[in-house]
Amino acid sequence: MTAPTALPAGYRLVDGPPTVGDYLLLRERSGLSPRRPDQAAAAVQGGWAAVHVLHEESGTAVGMGRVLGDGGWYFHVVDMAVLPEHQRRGIGEAVLTALLATIRREAPPGAFVNLLADPPGRRLYERHGFQQTGPNSVGMARTLD
């Protein structure tokens, strides 16, 4: 089991998703694809688990992550985001550690956890034991009209 990751002074890990407004801001400013408010409202309520990080001085949400899953075997890490000016401080590490701890604690043994890794996050995910699934597995996606 991975030990909890301490955040630097001035940051606080909060169980649960950020507000809709913070979710939209975190996605946009961290480089994730922007979403509409109706999509964000459904997303923050629809996850299996979520955490976010507050910058205590400003009260601003500066990082987040969510897990989608069936509660039994399959879990997908999504919405890993940290505002650029707060990166390289262990925030993403703390978010991922907390999400994986929740899966370990609440899911039956043998849970399958996956994610889509953009280049900036790959080292973080590899440190937590994630491995590439290709070349025998290819990620596929589609946006419905």
Image (tube, grey):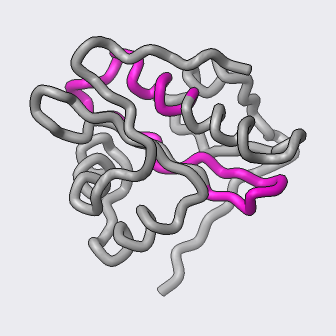
Q: Residue at x 75, y 33 (%)?
A: 132
Q: Residue at x 72, y 29 (%)?
A: 130
Q: Is residue 144 left or right of residue 74?
A: left
| Vertical arrangement, residue 134 with respect to residue 67, above or below | above
Instruction: State whether residue 126 is above or below residue 113.
Output: above
Residue 131 in magenta stretch: no
Magenta span contains residue 86: yes
Q: Residue at x 44, y 28 (%)?
A: 92
Looking at the picture, tell me which residue is in the foreground, 124 or 119.
124
Q: Name which quarter of the figure residue 19 lies in.
A: bottom left
Please name whichever residue, 119 or 78, is drawn nearer the observer in this view of the structure: 78
4 sits to left or right of 133? left
Residue occupying image coordinates x 49% and y 48%: 50
Tell me if 73 is positioned left or right of 132 in this view: right
Q: Which quadrant, please, contains the N terminus?
A: top right
Residue 19 or 40: which is nearer the viewer? 19
Q: What x and y, as percent, mark residue 31?
A: 32, 44
On screen, 25 above or below 80?
below
Q: Which residue reaches farthest left?
A: 58
Residue 40, horizontal then vertical, whole percent: 35, 67
Residue 125: x and y, percent?
61, 27
Q: Is residue 109 left or right of residue 21?
A: right
Q: Please count the marks in the image.
A: 0
Magenta span of residues: 68-97
